[in-house]
Image (cartoon, rainbow, N blue to C red):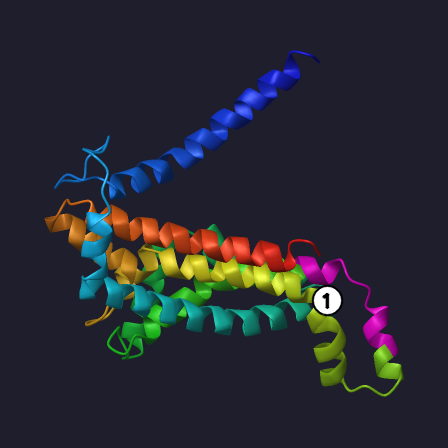
Amino acid sequence: MRIATPLLTLFRVLVYGFLLAPIVIVVLASLNAGNFLTFPPQGLSLRWFWTFLQNDVFINAIVYSAVLATAATSVSLVLGTMAALYFVRHAGREAEAVRIGILLPLILPEILTAIALLFFFYEIGIGTSYKIALFTGHVLMTLPFVFLNVTTALQGRDDSIELAARTLGASRYTAFRRITLPLISPGLATGGVFAFIISFDTFGISFILKGTGSAPLPIQLYDYLRFNFTPEAAAVSTVSILLTLLLVTAADLLFGRD
Protein backbone atom coordinates (compact mmCIF):
# COMPACT_ATOMS: atom_id res chain seq x y z
CA MET A 1 0.00 0.00 0.00
CA ARG A 2 2.89 2.39 0.70
CA ILE A 3 4.14 1.89 -2.86
CA ALA A 4 0.70 1.98 -4.49
CA THR A 5 -0.17 5.51 -3.34
CA PRO A 6 2.92 7.24 -4.83
CA LEU A 7 2.51 5.24 -8.04
CA LEU A 8 -1.13 6.28 -8.30
CA THR A 9 -0.15 9.90 -7.71
CA LEU A 10 2.54 9.67 -10.39
CA PHE A 11 0.04 8.13 -12.81
CA ARG A 12 -2.39 10.99 -12.20
CA VAL A 13 0.33 13.57 -12.75
CA LEU A 14 1.33 11.90 -16.02
CA VAL A 15 -2.27 11.74 -17.25
CA TYR A 16 -2.94 15.40 -16.40
CA GLY A 17 0.37 16.39 -17.93
CA PHE A 18 -0.47 14.51 -21.13
CA LEU A 19 -3.88 16.20 -21.35
CA LEU A 20 -2.62 19.70 -20.54
CA ALA A 21 0.56 19.62 -22.64
CA PRO A 22 -1.14 20.69 -25.92
CA ILE A 23 -2.80 23.63 -24.17
CA VAL A 24 0.47 24.75 -22.61
CA ILE A 25 2.24 24.49 -25.98
CA VAL A 26 -0.44 26.60 -27.69
CA VAL A 27 -0.27 29.30 -25.01
CA LEU A 28 3.53 29.43 -25.17
CA ALA A 29 3.45 29.51 -28.97
CA SER A 30 1.11 32.51 -28.84
CA LEU A 31 3.86 34.42 -27.00
CA ASN A 32 6.40 33.70 -29.72
CA ALA A 33 8.34 36.76 -30.80
CA GLY A 34 9.25 35.17 -34.12
CA ASN A 35 7.39 35.34 -37.41
CA PHE A 36 6.43 31.68 -37.62
CA LEU A 37 4.47 29.30 -35.42
CA THR A 38 7.26 27.30 -33.80
CA PHE A 39 7.98 25.66 -30.47
CA PRO A 40 9.86 26.42 -28.34
CA PRO A 41 9.21 30.16 -28.83
CA GLN A 42 11.88 32.37 -30.29
CA GLY A 43 11.63 34.90 -27.49
CA LEU A 44 8.53 36.16 -25.70
CA SER A 45 6.25 38.90 -26.98
CA LEU A 46 2.59 39.97 -27.01
CA ARG A 47 2.82 41.26 -30.59
CA TRP A 48 0.59 38.55 -32.01
CA PHE A 49 -2.19 39.31 -29.57
CA TRP A 50 -2.11 42.91 -30.77
CA THR A 51 -2.14 41.68 -34.37
CA PHE A 52 -5.12 39.46 -33.58
CA LEU A 53 -7.05 42.35 -31.99
CA GLN A 54 -6.60 44.33 -35.21
CA ASN A 55 -7.78 41.46 -37.42
CA ASP A 56 -11.45 42.05 -38.19
CA VAL A 57 -11.84 38.57 -39.67
CA PHE A 58 -11.03 36.84 -36.38
CA ILE A 59 -12.95 39.38 -34.29
CA ASN A 60 -16.05 38.89 -36.44
CA ALA A 61 -15.61 35.12 -36.24
CA ILE A 62 -15.46 35.23 -32.43
CA VAL A 63 -18.59 37.39 -32.28
CA TYR A 64 -20.38 35.12 -34.74
CA SER A 65 -19.39 32.00 -32.78
CA ALA A 66 -20.48 33.59 -29.49
CA VAL A 67 -23.88 34.61 -30.90
CA LEU A 68 -24.39 31.18 -32.48
CA ALA A 69 -23.35 29.39 -29.28
CA THR A 70 -25.62 31.59 -27.16
CA ALA A 71 -28.62 30.95 -29.41
CA ALA A 72 -27.97 27.20 -29.61
CA THR A 73 -27.44 26.99 -25.85
CA SER A 74 -30.66 28.89 -25.15
CA VAL A 75 -32.72 26.53 -27.29
CA SER A 76 -30.94 23.49 -25.83
CA LEU A 77 -31.66 24.68 -22.28
CA VAL A 78 -35.38 24.86 -23.01
CA LEU A 79 -35.61 21.60 -24.96
CA GLY A 80 -33.19 19.75 -22.70
CA THR A 81 -35.08 20.76 -19.54
CA MET A 82 -38.40 19.70 -21.05
CA ALA A 83 -36.94 16.39 -22.15
CA ALA A 84 -35.35 15.80 -18.74
CA LEU A 85 -38.63 16.53 -16.94
CA TYR A 86 -40.46 14.08 -19.16
CA PHE A 87 -37.74 11.45 -18.85
CA VAL A 88 -37.58 11.57 -15.04
CA ARG A 89 -41.23 12.07 -14.18
CA HIS A 90 -43.40 10.72 -16.97
CA ALA A 91 -41.50 8.35 -19.28
CA GLY A 92 -42.38 4.71 -18.78
CA ARG A 93 -41.30 1.94 -21.09
CA GLU A 94 -40.12 4.45 -23.67
CA ALA A 95 -37.67 6.08 -21.23
CA GLU A 96 -34.64 4.29 -22.64
CA ALA A 97 -35.65 5.13 -26.21
CA VAL A 98 -35.99 8.80 -25.24
CA ARG A 99 -32.58 8.80 -23.59
CA ILE A 100 -30.83 7.11 -26.51
CA GLY A 101 -32.56 9.37 -29.03
CA ILE A 102 -31.34 12.52 -27.29
CA LEU A 103 -27.83 11.18 -26.71
CA LEU A 104 -27.47 9.83 -30.26
CA PRO A 105 -25.42 12.85 -31.49
CA LEU A 106 -22.83 11.96 -28.83
CA ILE A 107 -22.81 8.29 -29.80
CA LEU A 108 -22.47 8.81 -33.55
CA PRO A 109 -19.40 10.45 -35.09
CA GLU A 110 -19.99 14.17 -35.47
CA ILE A 111 -19.24 14.06 -39.19
CA LEU A 112 -22.05 11.54 -39.78
CA THR A 113 -24.56 13.79 -38.01
CA ALA A 114 -23.39 16.73 -40.11
CA ILE A 115 -23.68 14.82 -43.40
CA ALA A 116 -27.15 13.52 -42.47
CA LEU A 117 -28.32 17.06 -41.70
CA LEU A 118 -26.76 18.33 -44.93
CA PHE A 119 -28.66 15.75 -47.01
CA PHE A 120 -31.88 16.46 -45.11
CA PHE A 121 -31.83 20.23 -45.58
CA TYR A 122 -30.93 19.96 -49.25
CA GLU A 123 -33.70 17.39 -49.71
CA ILE A 124 -36.32 19.78 -48.32
CA GLY A 125 -34.95 22.62 -50.46
CA ILE A 126 -33.35 24.79 -47.79
CA GLY A 127 -29.71 23.87 -48.08
CA THR A 128 -27.18 25.87 -46.07
CA SER A 129 -28.05 29.32 -47.42
CA TYR A 130 -30.08 30.49 -44.43
CA LYS A 131 -27.83 28.99 -41.73
CA ILE A 132 -30.78 26.98 -40.37
CA ALA A 133 -28.83 23.79 -40.94
CA LEU A 134 -25.82 25.11 -39.00
CA PHE A 135 -28.00 26.26 -36.11
CA THR A 136 -29.87 22.94 -36.01
CA GLY A 137 -26.59 21.04 -35.97
CA HIS A 138 -25.31 23.07 -33.04
CA VAL A 139 -28.55 22.49 -31.11
CA LEU A 140 -28.31 18.74 -31.71
CA MET A 141 -24.71 18.68 -30.48
CA THR A 142 -25.41 20.73 -27.35
CA LEU A 143 -28.78 19.24 -26.35
CA PRO A 144 -27.34 16.02 -24.80
CA PHE A 145 -25.16 17.98 -22.36
CA VAL A 146 -28.14 19.95 -21.03
CA PHE A 147 -30.28 16.81 -20.86
CA LEU A 148 -27.68 14.83 -18.90
CA ASN A 149 -27.01 17.56 -16.35
CA VAL A 150 -30.65 18.46 -15.76
CA THR A 151 -31.60 14.78 -15.52
CA THR A 152 -28.94 14.28 -12.85
CA ALA A 153 -30.22 17.32 -10.93
CA LEU A 154 -33.83 16.13 -11.13
CA GLN A 155 -33.04 12.58 -10.04
CA GLY A 156 -31.46 13.86 -6.84
CA ARG A 157 -34.46 15.97 -5.79
CA ASP A 158 -37.59 15.17 -3.77
CA ASP A 159 -40.78 15.67 -5.82
CA SER A 160 -42.86 15.93 -2.66
CA ILE A 161 -41.84 19.59 -2.23
CA GLU A 162 -43.41 20.55 -5.53
CA LEU A 163 -46.46 18.38 -4.78
CA ALA A 164 -46.86 20.17 -1.44
CA ALA A 165 -46.85 23.52 -3.24
CA ARG A 166 -49.51 22.26 -5.65
CA THR A 167 -51.76 21.16 -2.77
CA LEU A 168 -51.43 24.65 -1.27
CA GLY A 169 -52.83 26.20 -4.43
CA ALA A 170 -49.77 26.89 -6.57
CA SER A 171 -50.18 26.36 -10.29
CA ARG A 172 -47.86 24.06 -12.26
CA TYR A 173 -45.99 27.07 -13.62
CA THR A 174 -45.63 28.70 -10.19
CA ALA A 175 -44.46 25.46 -8.57
CA PHE A 176 -41.92 24.92 -11.33
CA ARG A 177 -40.65 28.53 -11.29
CA ARG A 178 -40.37 28.91 -7.52
CA ILE A 179 -39.38 25.38 -6.46
CA THR A 180 -38.16 23.08 -9.23
CA LEU A 181 -36.23 25.68 -11.23
CA PRO A 182 -34.07 26.89 -8.29
CA LEU A 183 -33.37 23.28 -7.28
CA ILE A 184 -32.13 22.28 -10.73
CA SER A 185 -30.29 25.56 -11.41
CA PRO A 186 -26.84 23.96 -10.85
CA GLY A 187 -27.66 21.37 -13.51
CA LEU A 188 -28.91 24.07 -15.85
CA ALA A 189 -25.79 26.17 -15.30
CA THR A 190 -23.41 23.25 -15.81
CA GLY A 191 -25.29 22.03 -18.87
CA GLY A 192 -25.42 25.54 -20.29
CA VAL A 193 -21.68 26.05 -19.84
CA PHE A 194 -20.85 22.73 -21.50
CA ALA A 195 -23.32 23.45 -24.31
CA PHE A 196 -21.83 26.88 -24.98
CA ILE A 197 -18.26 25.55 -25.03
CA ILE A 198 -19.18 22.65 -27.34
CA SER A 199 -21.03 24.96 -29.73
CA PHE A 200 -18.26 27.57 -29.68
CA ASP A 201 -15.50 25.05 -30.43
CA THR A 202 -17.18 22.39 -32.58
CA PHE A 203 -15.56 21.91 -35.99
CA GLY A 204 -17.18 19.04 -37.90
CA ILE A 205 -20.74 20.35 -37.79
CA SER A 206 -19.62 23.89 -38.64
CA PHE A 207 -17.35 22.76 -41.48
CA ILE A 208 -20.04 20.72 -43.24
CA LEU A 209 -23.07 22.93 -42.60
CA LYS A 210 -21.68 26.46 -42.81
CA GLY A 211 -23.13 28.61 -45.55
CA THR A 212 -21.64 31.54 -47.38
CA GLY A 213 -20.56 34.68 -45.57
CA SER A 214 -19.59 34.65 -41.90
CA ALA A 215 -18.06 31.48 -40.47
CA PRO A 216 -17.50 30.30 -36.88
CA LEU A 217 -14.08 30.71 -35.30
CA PRO A 218 -12.85 27.10 -35.76
CA ILE A 219 -13.50 27.36 -39.51
CA GLN A 220 -11.71 30.70 -39.78
CA LEU A 221 -8.73 29.25 -37.92
CA TYR A 222 -8.68 26.25 -40.27
CA ASP A 223 -8.80 28.49 -43.35
CA TYR A 224 -6.12 30.76 -41.90
CA LEU A 225 -3.70 27.90 -41.19
CA ARG A 226 -4.07 26.60 -44.73
CA PHE A 227 -2.21 29.64 -46.06
CA ASN A 228 -0.51 31.20 -43.01
CA PHE A 229 1.57 29.75 -40.22
CA THR A 230 2.10 32.62 -37.83
CA PRO A 231 1.65 32.71 -34.02
CA GLU A 232 -1.50 34.77 -34.56
CA ALA A 233 -3.43 31.50 -34.81
CA ALA A 234 -2.05 30.44 -31.43
CA ALA A 235 -3.04 33.82 -29.97
CA VAL A 236 -6.62 33.32 -31.17
CA SER A 237 -6.64 29.81 -29.71
CA THR A 238 -5.32 31.13 -26.39
CA VAL A 239 -8.17 33.64 -26.20
CA SER A 240 -10.61 30.78 -26.84
CA ILE A 241 -8.98 28.74 -24.07
CA LEU A 242 -9.19 31.68 -21.65
CA LEU A 243 -12.87 32.15 -22.47
CA THR A 244 -13.52 28.48 -21.71
CA LEU A 245 -11.66 28.68 -18.40
CA LEU A 246 -13.57 31.84 -17.48
CA LEU A 247 -16.94 30.18 -18.11
CA VAL A 248 -16.04 27.02 -16.19
CA THR A 249 -14.63 28.99 -13.26
CA ALA A 250 -17.68 31.27 -13.09
CA ALA A 251 -20.06 28.30 -13.12
CA ASP A 252 -18.05 26.56 -10.41
CA LEU A 253 -17.99 29.64 -8.19
CA LEU A 254 -21.71 30.26 -8.59
CA PHE A 255 -23.03 26.69 -8.39
CA GLY A 256 -20.17 24.41 -7.40
CA ARG A 257 -21.00 24.56 -3.70
CA ASP A 258 -24.57 23.32 -4.10
User: Which quadrant would the N terminus be assigned to in this image?
Assistant: top right
Identify the residue position indicated by label 1 in the image: 183
What kind of secondary structure does the magenta stretch mostly adopt?
A: helix
Q: Report if residue 159 lies within the magenta region.
A: yes
Direction top: furthest residue: 3
Residue shown at the point (74%, 68%) measured from the top left: 89
- Tell me where residue 165 appears, x and y as whole percent: 84, 79
Secondary structure found at label 1: helix
Q: The residue under label 1 is which amino acid type?
A: Leu
Q: Position of residue 56 (x, y in %)?
A: 19, 66
On screen, 91 above or below 247? below
Q: Residue at x 45, y 62 (%)?
A: 196
Count of numbered labels shown in the rendering: 1
* Left or right of 187, for residue 205: left
Depth check: give the residue in front, 23 or 104: 23
Relative image position of residue 195 (x, y in whole percent)? 48, 61
**Which residue is found at the position 73% from the left and 72% from the top?**
180
Let me know if residue 214 is in the magenta part.
Answer: no
Residue displayed at 40% across by 65% down: 138
> Label 1 crowding class (10 Å Cα cut-off): few <14, some 14-19, many 20+?
some
Which quarter of the rendering shows the C terminus?
A: bottom right
**Residue 92 can be seen, yes or no:** no
First to last magenta residue range: 152-164
Q: Between 30 and 129, which is closer to the camera in this rendering?
A: 30
